[in-house]
Image: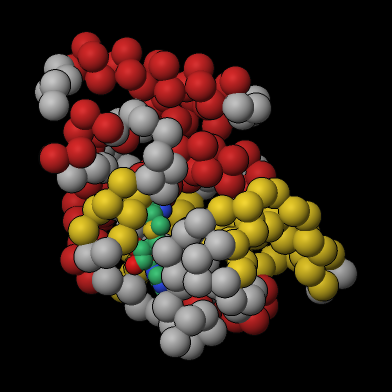
Amino acid sequence: MHWPDEAELARARKALLAHLRRKGIADPRVLAALEKVPRHLFVLPEYLPLAYEDRPLPIGAGQTISQPYIVALSTQALAPSPADRVLEIGTGSGYQTAVLAELAGEVFTVERIPELSQEAEARLRRLGYTNVRFRVGDGTKGWPEEAPFSRILVTAAAPKVPPSLLAQLAEGGRMVIPVGGRFDQDLWLVHKAAGRPVYEYLCPVTFVPLIGEEGWR
Ligand code: SAM
């Protein structure tokens, strides 16, 4: 396989952005964040030539870095701003975390696999992010000490919306979460209005399972 140099990676990143625009991603802040975060530094070295393809890639421990289109679509639906405190469940490589950190005031990210959390934290520190806090644990229970959150993004698939996450979503807040079976799910934008969830359908998706007390056991 051909090994890309920095110039080729930069061209591939621009081509990915054009592809995302064609697929309907229109929020200029989201596009700018995806243009800025170097996805090739979040993939395993053997996948470098595929870093700017619009597809998920393995990151070790049986997990994946999400497809760029799904990262863009989820972030656009979440609509984070500098006033927001965002809870992310499923740190993985930290790529989506970095995109959120570009747009939100503070990001709190939870990952159940310690090695992935540690690697993501080191990567984001190297890239200069100072507005992200990392935690290892069962994200289905949220991060009660820091709740409420005005935005919650779940990057692993749940059989249903975990009640703890709904409880930790602020009134008027937004949550993006894939819900469904083990292998096929639907991505939902959940608004919290008058204490109750209101569901807006986004698209069909395939995510790795959310494993925990209020997820898959
Ligand atoms: N957003 C990540 C990225 O950009 O690399 C990809 C996340 S990957 C699709 C889903 C992650 O959720 C995996 O790293 C997995 O270990 C994690 N996960 C699954 N269940 C979890 C739980 N209960 N709490 C926290 N993390 C969980």
| In this view, 28 is above or below 60 | above
The residue at 42%/33% (across/down) is 54
Quick one: which residue is furthest to the right in this view? 194
User: Can residue 76 be spotted in the picture?
Assistant: yes
Q: Can you say which quadrant of the picture contains the N terminus? A: top left
Q: Position of residue 51 (x, y in %)?
A: 29, 33
Q: Is residue 101 left or right of residue 30?
A: left
| In this view, 210 is above or below 151 | below
Q: Quadrant of ligand 1?
A: bottom left
Instruction: Name which quarter of the figure residue 53 lies in.
Output: top left
Instruction: Name which quarter of the figure residue 192 lies in.
Output: bottom right
Q: Can you say which quadrant of the picture contains the C terminus? A: bottom left
Instruction: Name which quarter of the figure residue 184 lies in.
Output: bottom right
The residue at 51%/56% (across/down) is 206
Pick the residue in front: 27 or 43: 43
The residue at 21%/58% (across/down) is 60
Q: Position of residue 88 (x, y in %)?
A: 48, 60
Q: Position of residue 169 (x, y in %)?
A: 66, 68
How many marks the image carries: the answer is: 0
Pick the residue in front: 65 or 32: 65
User: Can residue 94 be spotted in the picture?
Assistant: no
| In this view, 49 is above or below 118 | above
The residue at 49%/43% (across/down) is 71
Q: Position of residue 212 (x, y in %)?
A: 44, 82
Q: Is residue 59 left or right of residue 137?
A: left
